[in-house]
Structure formats: C-alpha cells, structure tokens
Amino acid sequence: MSSDKGKESGEGSSSSSRRSAADHHQQQQQQQPAAQVLSRYESQKRRDWITFGQYLKNQRPPVTMPQCNYNHVLEFLRYLDQFGKTKVHLQGCVFFGHPDPAGPCTCPLRQAWGSLDALIGRLRAAFEENGGLPETNPFASGAIRVYLREVRDSQAKARGIPYKKKKKKKINHLKPNDDSSKFPMQTS
C-alpha cells in the first residue's frame, strides 16, 4: 500500500504542476492588453522589420535606418543565406541541372528565391509604414531587383528547371465580321 501512495502523490504533484503552468499561461494572456490580433502576414512583416533593424545595429559601426541603403540590404540577404534550407548545386557538381538529385553532395544550402522575394516585399512595405519615403526605400532599389533576378535564374539553372513567368491571359476581342451566332444575344 505504501508504494501506491507514493505513486499517487507523485502523479498528483506532476498534474498540479501542469495545471499551474496552464494557469500561469492564462494569466499572462489575460494581463496582455486586448491589442489587435495581427494577421500572419503582418506579424511576419513586423518580425522581419525587427530582425533587419537588429542586423543594422550589430554592424560595426552601427547603421541607423536613415543611413541604410541598398548595399546594406544586399549584405543582409547574403547574410541570411547561411540559414537557408535550399540546396543550390554549384556548376561543377554532378547534380547541377538535375531537378531530383540521386544522392547527397557538398553544395551549399541557401535561402530560396521565393523566400527572399517575399521578405523584400514585406520589408519594402514595413519601411514605408515606419515613416520611410517611397523615393528613399532601399528595398525598392533596382539593385535589389537585379540581385533577386540573378538568384532566381541561378537557382533555376542549378535545379534544371527554367523559371517561367506567369503569362497574362489574353482577352479575345470579337471582330465585326466574326460569326456572332456562337454568342446569341437577347433581344427585348
């Protein structure tokens, strides 16, 4: 019997600690002001903006946002490559140009083009929302667009899948001498 009591008291203490952790979490949520709930996009944009600001502060010497230009943005994008998860085969790799490589290789992991493109879009919007002028927006620079295009093209070549831009749908206009019987018109 004494062994049963030990188990019961052990179980009770662990479940009570679970309850107290849940209570603590609820209290924290209730203490936070009833601020607006941000969408996934807005919270990601805010997180990206804070990360970029921290990156600038960590530069030697630190860079303020008004001092920031497209070169700082390009350095930031290159810095982010070290945290990438997309295998980008180098030109000398046996898997270069193969969409589904048969085995492992030593090629680097990089940030995917789509991730960088979305990041720049969010930072471009955040810059202007935080008081920056569209004319001085370093994320809207032509150099950034060129860099993203080069990343996109190099990653497409490395995978052997050419990037195809989505084509706009053409609107067919009827010529006056077309057979309009295909589209009967209602008469009143």
Image: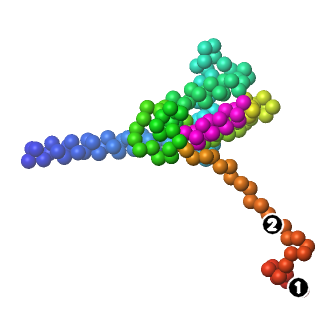
Question: What secondary structure is marked by label 2?
Answer: loop
Vertical placement of residue 141 versus 67, above or below? below
Circle 2 residue:
172
Give the left or right position of residue 84, taking residue 130 as reference: left
Q: Is residue 155 magenta?
A: yes
User: Callout 1 environment at 10 Å: few (<14), some (14 to 19), or many (20+)?
Assistant: few
From the viewer's side, name the closer residue of 63 and 70.
70
Q: Is residue 188 above or below residue 66?
A: below
Provide residue 118's location: percent of width, then percent of height. Answer: 63, 41
Residue 102, quarter of picture = top left
For disc 1, the marked residue is 187
x 63%, y 13%: residue: 61
Segment colored magenta: 143-158
Quadrant in the picture for the C terminus: bottom right
Q: Is residue 29 found left or right of 75 in the rendered image?
A: left
**Residue 170 in the figure: left or right of residue 11:** right
User: In terms of image quadrants, where is residue 131?
Assistant: top right
Residue 182 in percent (x, y) is at 79, 80
Is 34 contained in the magenta span? no
Image spot of residue 83 (x, y percent): 50, 32
Q: Residue at left 63%, top 16%? A: 62
What type of secondary structure mainly makes up the magenta span?
helix
